[in-house]
Image (spheres, helix red, strand yellow):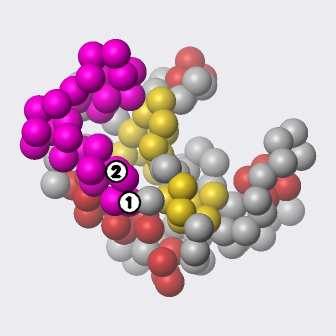
Amino acid sequence: MKKFIPITASSKFGLCGLPIRVDTYKNCSHGCRYCFANNRVIMEFEKKLQIGNEQYVARKLKKIFDDKNVNPENYLEMLISQGITWHCGGMSDPFQPSEQKYEATKKLVDITNKYNISILFSTKGFSTY
């Protein structure tokens, strides 16, 4: 399964107010016809399901909080160090059917809970977690 870097500083924070965006999946297994995650045409991208690299997030949080090593020129690291709420699910549903198999969102929550990071989830899905 192909993995991607799941956390970014959003260029759309003026619209949602949460400048830290994290996605646990690229593409979605819900299969909704109206969904831009699977059907956008503006940018071509690989249409297969991809999973966010939770180890990248774990290393980033360890660097910032445990090692106290924040690069003041790195906007994302500065935002994370300030304890700002993250937005998860802006591009693909974090609680889609694939979550039962891959548990990418659960792994993200487990990692961020160690550092008391709050996450706002955008979802149409349902999870038993």
Which numbered tag is attached to residue 92?
none
**Would you say residue 35 is visible in this rendering?**
no
**In the image, residue 15 above or below residue 60:** above
Task: Identify the residue position indicated by label 1 in the image.
Answer: 54
**Camera-side residue of 33 and 60:** 60
Element at badge 2?
helix
- At a point 54% along the width and 55% down the height, the residue shown is 4
In which quarter of the view is residue 20 placed? top left
- At a point 53% along the width and 63% down the height, the residue shown is 3
**Camera-side residue of 51 and 121:** 51
**Identity, as a three-letter code, of the amino acid under mark 2:** Val
**Would you say residue 38 is visible in this rendering?**
yes
* View extreme (bottom): residue: 101
The 10 Å Cα crowd at callout 2, few under 14, some 14 to 19, many 20 or more, is some
Q: Contact, CB < 8 Å: mark 1 with mark 2?
A: yes
**Identity, as a three-letter code, of the amino acid under mark 1:** Glu
- Quadrant containing the C terminus in the rendered view: bottom left
- Quadrant containing the N terminus in the rendered view: bottom right
Task: Identify the residue position indicated by label 2 in the image.
Answer: 57
Q: Which residues are magenta?
A: 54-81
